[in-house]
Image: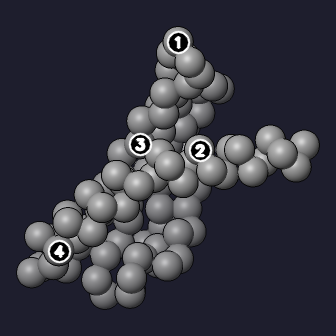
Amino acid sequence: MHFAGMITKVRPMEYRDVRYFYGAYALGPCLGRPTRLQSWTEPVDRGTQVQLRVDSFIRKGWARSWTWVQSRFWQRFPKWMRLGIDAAETVN
């Protein structure tokens, strides 16, 4: 993976937009190329809700597989995020 990009818009504690450069890729330079990552945060009763959106160009014929892999990855992401936050809190 290579995700070189530039943060293009930030609203502190609310929104962030990252545009990826042409050389960014996932799983291989010819298979998938992320183009944009957006994140939104919103306070909720027990903390903060985070929403993410990833836009990508995917090689023809790989769209179904890419969608399946992405669905599995993002289902697990909240747990991984919580583990990372908990680990960071124990260090501080």
Mark carried by residue 82:
2
- Point out residue 55 in the picture as x, y percentages from the top left corner: 31, 55
Q: Amino acid at mark 1?
A: Asp
The residue mark sitting in front, 2 or 4, is 2
Dot 3 lies on which element? strand
Query: Which image quadrant is residue 22 in?
Result: bottom left
- How many numbered marks have been drawn onto this rendered protein structure? 4
Q: Nearer the viewer, residue 49 or 45?
A: 45
Dot 4 lies on which element? helix
Q: Are marks 2 and 4 in contact (CB under 8 Å)?
A: no
The residue singled out by tag 4 in the image is 65
Mark carried by residue 45:
1
The residue mark sitting in front, 4 or 1, is 1
Q: Are marks 2 and 3 in contact (CB under 8 Å)?
A: no
Q: Nearer the viewer, residue 48 or 26?
A: 48
Q: Is residue 53 left or right of residue 11?
A: left
